[in-house]
Structures are given as C-alpha cells and as structure tokens.
Amino acid sequence: MSDVLDLTRELIARKSVTPDDAGCQTLIAERLQAAGFALESLRFGEVDNLWATHGQGAPVLVLLGHTDVVPSGPVENWTSDPFVPEIRDGLLYGRGAADMKSGVAAFVVAAEQFVAAHPHHTGTLALLLTSDEEGAAIDGVRRVARTFAERGTRIDWCITGEPSSTAELGDLLRVGRRGSLSATLTVRGVQGHVAYPDKARNPIHDVAPALAELVARRWDAGYESFPPTSLQISNIESGTGATNVIPGTATVQFNLRYTPHWDAPKLEAAVAAILDGHGLDYALDWHRSGEPFYTPEGPLRSAAREVLAAHLGRPPEESTGGGTSDARFIAPLGAQCIEIGPVNASIHQVDEHVRVADLEALPDVYGALIARLLPDAG
Ligand SMILES: [Zn+2]
C-alpha cells in the first residue's frame, strides 16, 4: 500500500469534525519533524493550527490545507462508516476523502520526499494546516494570517490543496476568487392605515426605487478572467400580513460577488451613496466574508500550468470560479495563490470519495511543482 494512501486512511479514521483536529496535526507534525521541518503550533480557542517550515529565507512557498471535515450527517445513509476508510472499485470512501485529507496527505508525502531529495533547496518550504476551515473560520487561517502580518512573516507563493478538479485530476487550475460581501438593510417607515397614507410612511415604497438602482447598476465590466461584479437580492421581508396596513419597516438582504476592481470598504460606500440618494431612513449591517484575489501570469501560475499539462496531457482550465477558501486570508499578505487538488464532485456529500489513482498521483504533482519553485541552491 502506498504511503499517501496509508496516511489519508489514517487521517480519515480520526474523526476531526470541525473545529476538532482529533490528533491529525500531531500525526503530521511527528512525520514532518522526523523529515527535518521546524514546527510551531498556533492554538487559538479550540482551533489547532500547525506551521511547519524547512529551509530559510525567500522565496517562501506555503502548502495550505485543513484537517477538519464537515459532519457526516446520518451515518445510516452512508454505504460504509464515514470514519472507517474503505476502498471499493478503485475509490477511497470516507468523510474528508476529497475535502481535503487526501490533499493534506499528499502535501506531507510530497514535502517529505522533496526535502529528502533536495536538502539544500532555495528558500523556504512551509505547510500551514488548520482545523477551522469548514466552521466559523475565525481562529484558523484568518487568525494565523493576522499573527503573520504582525510579526512580518512573508509568503511569496501559496498552493491550496482544496479539491478544485472537476472531472479529472488537474483539469482546473484556480487562479483567483471573487470577493463576497453580504448586507442586511433595514428601512424604517411609519406604520399606518392604507386609507390614510398621509399619516404613514411606507418603507416598501421608499426602498423599491433604491433597490432598482442597486440592481441596475453596472459595477464593472469584469476583470481579467473574472465575470462582472454582481449584486443579488436574496431576501425581502415586510408587511403585517394584513392588506390594510402600511408596514413600519422593510428588511432586505443582498450579496455582492466582486472583482479585484473593488474592495469591501469601497463597495459599502458605493451602496450607502445610492441609499442616501433616495433619502431613506435606514440601517445597514455588513458581513465581509473575503476580499477577491487574483494571481496573474508569473512563476507560480506558469509552473502550475506546465506541471498539470504534463500530468494530464493537456493544459488545465484556468478559473476564478467557485466558492471561497482559506487562500482569501493568505492573499492579502502579498502572496500569489493558486488551488490544485482532487476532483470535487462528492465533497460534503454522503459517500464522499477520491479516486485512488488520483490520490497516488497527487504527491508527484505537488512534488514537481515544489521542485520548480524551490530549485537547488547553486
Ligand atoms: Zn475544504
């Protein structure tokens, strides 16, 4: 049985439902220490974070991953126990098989093999693991990145091992993510009888033209491979249920997915300016879930393209689509970020799985990438 398959099985068997690491990082830390890595545990609240480095100085290449998993849901819906890894027909089943204990195990094996073969590589090879990616994501990489910023830890390149592939390992190279910003808008009016509108103020009538303007606005025309920034209204609530009452308040929720043309403060100001222009009496509650990031053409992106093309026999699609990942916290440190990992078709589902052949290929893919980025010191 291969080393990476063994390690993935050992990790799946540890029931690390977010934010419980369940000993995954201890197991990894022991291996990396034996391989010559320097270790630092960064525990915040109930969250474990592990920072392991080999070598020193620039460039700093970080392999970023998480040891936590989402809950399995009812175990009886699974064909086999989600925390007892099982191989059937060339697929390894278990919670975290794809998201992302396979990626983490492949990082560890690739790192061990790389430093054994290249003890005098240039720069620094680092692994950063958290047990809080699937949960609140407050005391995980978000908090670690703040610590790094305070102490001046620099990162040049970051590879996230999240399951990014769609049909085959390496068919998609993620080179950025849109930003995401949500708002709850509460518009105050004056409740009254519909027969006496002069004695009331209808918040629905107040907010409707402002919403029309927000929705109609062309925020930008896109950016590189990003689609245009979009505002979507997700919820509107108002009214008492009676047909003869003007409501006292209206509440609207909306979300913006945005390109690197914008950041959260700029978008918040632009939205407020539109609302102010309509003379609304309102309160706005913002939730910032992550700024956009984009990795333009450069050493990281071209190395990743070439390595994936060599593995797959054709170049990968280069995309900024999909949801969010912890790379959103590393990118603001000035790092270029990409994501490469196994096929994501079964993540968070019942009978989550990874193709064993993909799993066994993954350490070589990461290893080839590391070797290009951190060549032997000459
Ligand atoms: Zn994940």
Image (tube, rainbow, N blue to C red):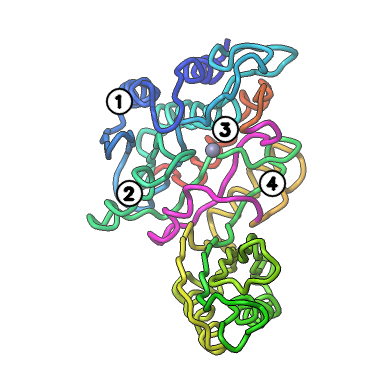
In the rendered structure, does residue 185 fall within the stretch colored magenta?
no
**Quadrant (top left/top right/bottom left/bottom right) for the N terminus:** top right
Question: Can see residue 304?
Answer: yes
Residue 302, placed above or below residue 193: above
Query: Which label sits on residue 18?
Result: none
Q: Mark 3 and mark 1 in contact? Answer it, CB < 8 Å.
A: no
In the picture, the disc for residue 99 is 3
Instruction: Name the amino acid, label 2.
Output: Arg
Q: Is residue 353 visible?
A: no
Name the residue carrying label 1: 33
Q: Secondary structure at mark 3?
A: loop
Q: Earlier in the sequence, mark 3 or mark 4?
A: 3
**Badge 1: how crowded within 10 Å, few (<14), some, or many (20+)?**
some
Q: Are marks 3 and 4 in contact (CB under 8 Å)?
A: no
| Mark 2 → mark 1, Cα distance in angstroms | 24 Å
Q: Residue at (49%, 71%) from the top-left corner?
A: 263
Give the residue at x 63% y 84%.
196
Q: CA distance from mark 4 to mark 1?
A: 32 Å
Q: Which residue corresponds to mark 2?
A: 143
Q: Which mark is residue 172?
A: 4
When the figure is inspected, residue 97 is found, relative to residue 75, above or below; the finding is below
Question: Type of residue at label 1?
Answer: Gln
Q: Tell me where the magenta segment starts and ends, as one range.
A: 321-347
Q: In the image, what residue type sits under mark 3? A: Asp
Q: What's the residue at 63%, 27% (across, down)?
A: 361
x and y percentages locating residue 110 in the rendered image: 49, 30
